[in-house]
Amino acid sequence: MAQDRHGSRPETGDSGQDRFEPFADDATVRSVGALSFENGKDRIAVHGSIDLTRDKAGLAQAKHLRETLAAIVKALETGDLPEAVADSPDAAPTSVRNPFA
């Protein structure tokens, strides 16, 4: 199987070792190229980059990316969602008293 320029092998399909159930745990990671989806119970963190090349490897990666995003959207659509998660990473930081002062 061809490698992308980041040295990662394109992943294809849902093999038994590549199960990714969005929001099911705080440990599972799915990688597509050099792009990682880090599972969490209240959020999924996406890190990295991906080059979708115009070849069979690029097609395989694009399909895997589509499957991953479709699973995330399906999980969000089937759940009873709050307006926002309690500890949003975009929330303004809170001040605490300096214990060394």
Image (cartoon, grey):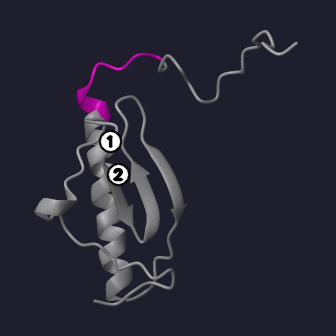
The residue that disc 1 covers is 73
Q: SS at mark 1?
A: helix
Q: In which quarter of the image is residue 33?
A: bottom left
Which amino acid, mark 1? Answer: Val
Query: What's the magenta bit mostly, secondary-structure-wise?
Result: loop
Q: Does the magenta stretch include residue 56?
A: no
Which amino acid, mark 2? Answer: Leu
Q: What stretch is highlighted in magenta?
A: 76-83
- Quadrant (top left/top right/bottom left/bottom right) for the C terminus: top right
Left or right: 76 as drawn, with respect to 54: left
Comparing 69 with 16, the one in front is: 16
Contact? badges 2 and 1 (CB < 8 Å):
yes
The residue that disc 2 covers is 69
Image height of 6 relative to 45, above or below = below
**Residue at horizontal 28 percent and vertical 36 percent from the top:** 25
Q: Where is residue 5 in the image (x, y as percent from the top left)?
A: 50, 85
**Residue at horizontal 25 percent and vertical 35 percent from the top:** 24
Q: Residue furthest right?
A: 101
Q: Quadrant of residue 10?
A: bottom left
Comparing 55 with 47, the one in front is: 47
- Quadrant (top left/top right/bottom left/bottom right) for the N terminus: bottom left
Q: Where is residue 4 in the image (x, y as percent from the top left)?
A: 44, 84
Image height of 40 relative to 97, above or below = below
**Disc 2 residue crowd, few under 14, some 14–19, many 20+, Cα 10 Å:** some
